[in-house]
Amino acid sequence: MAGARLEKVTMQEHMAINVSPGPIRPIRQISDYFPHFYPFAPALLRPRPAPLPALPNGPAPETALGSPMEENGTPTAKPGGSQLPQCLEEEQDGDSDETTALGSLEFTLLLDQQNCVLHCTIHRAKGLKPLDSGSIDTFVKANLLPGTSKASQLRTRTVRGSRGPRWDETLTYHGFTCQDAGRKSLRLCVCEESRLRRRAEPLGELRVPLKKLVPNLTRSFNICLEKRRLTKRPSSLDTARGMSLYEEEVEETGEERGRILLSLCYSSQRGGLLVGVLRCAHLAPMDANGYSDPFVRIFLRPNTGKKSKYKTTVRKKTLNPEFNEEFFYAGQREELAQKTLLVSVWDYDLGTANDFIGGLQLSINSTGEKLRHWSECLARSDRRLELWHPLDGAPPQLGD
């Protein structure tokens, strides 16, 4: 009505407008729209709320999901909207994501006790889950723990475009003894090689204690992959010399320097001792890049001539060098028995002093395998004897 004055409404009266007393309705929650299901436990379903009594001359009651109810208690679609999905009554069948989400790896292990070699044959992987959607390029990386990571690191070739790759490739660890099997474990990590990322991303890993192996008996494994576990580093190691890559599970009393494979033979035709430097394994890294540039020096003391000192060629950027070089020391068997053969492994540094990695001494005063190697070599002529020897941390004394 024109000209009529609007009646002023107080705040109290304004707050009391359109207030109809009635039952308190349940508040809708986000879990009502998106129910949770736990694959490792029985399905926890919220019971359906009982239909609310109809209000006199009012709209039909609503469920907890907010949809009107029919007379039989079933929800009906709202006009102008879509009907919400009902909750599932049973747990969906399928494997648990906690156990098989990362896939599995099939491989075999063989410990050759006579040749001190560990063979690890990687067969195939199943059910890998890539970081990104689409095909993946994968390879397997192997490490021995505890030990320097790059000294025992081996890898397979890369298989491209497959979530179930097959490698059928054998990784070989030289200088691996039964004593190593009793205290070491093998870590296998399946990695994804990406052109966009510089470093390969791990998809999952597994660890196998090698003490379960029986010498000269092949054992097959099919193990589910787990998330990668970070390992700790001993505080006693020198991080400035590349030892920061040392990975282990427990602290050890002694620090591994590596091993060397030597060949000794007394030649009756040439009248002297043949010393063969074949290879080294698991050397300690001495450079900042985590590797070394190793070479071997041998010295027969007391010094009786100019041909008492030899050294091999330098192998660049490796912790498992292969030399296959042989040297000759002339002398009668009785004279050689009173001498000492010093073998030392060094890291070559250009412009600075070379770093000592490890060494050993062979003589009649040695013990264990060193004494047996030296004695059997001089006792039998024209018979080549090859043995692995661990390297000591004490530098050799080259003086007489």
Image (cartoon, rainbow, N blue to C red):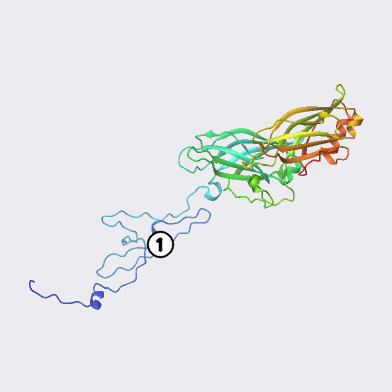
Q: Quadrant of the N terminus?
A: bottom left
Is the residue 323 above or below the residue 198 in the image?
above
11 with respect to 390 (left or right): left
For image coordinates 58% across by 33% down, the residue present is 157
**Which residue is nearer to you in this view: 127 or 48?**
127
40 with respect to 247 (left or right): left
Taking the image as drawn, is residue 252 in sight? yes
For image coordinates 50% across by 47% down, the residue present is 94
Give the residue type at disc 1: Arg
Q: From the top left corner, tell me how far across and down residue 213 is, in percent.
A: 72, 41
Instruction: Spot the residue most to the front.
Output: 351
Q: From the top left corner, tell me how far across and down residue 327 is, in percent.
A: 79, 27
Q: Quadrant of the C terminus?
A: top right
45 with respect to 247 (left or right): left
12 with respect to 126 (left or right): left
For image coordinates 88% across by 28% down, the residue present is 380
Q: Secondary structure at mark 1?
A: loop
**Which residue is nearer to you in this view: 303 or 359?**
303
Taking the image as drawn, is residue 145 in sight? no
**Which residue is nearer to you in this view: 230 or 8?**
230
Q: From the top left corner, tell me how far across and down residue 16 is, in percent.
A: 25, 75
**Residue 209: quadrant of the picture:** top right
**Residue 283: quadrant of the picture:** top right
Instruction: Spot the residue most to the top.
Output: 269
Q: What crowding class fits label 1: few (fewer than 14 Cα within 10 Å), some (14-19), or many (20 or more)?
A: few
Q: From the top left corner, tell me how far across and down residue 192 is, in percent.
A: 53, 40
Instruction: Spot the residue most to the right.
Output: 334
Residue placed under numbered mark 1 in the picture: 48
**Residue 134: quadrant of the picture:** top left
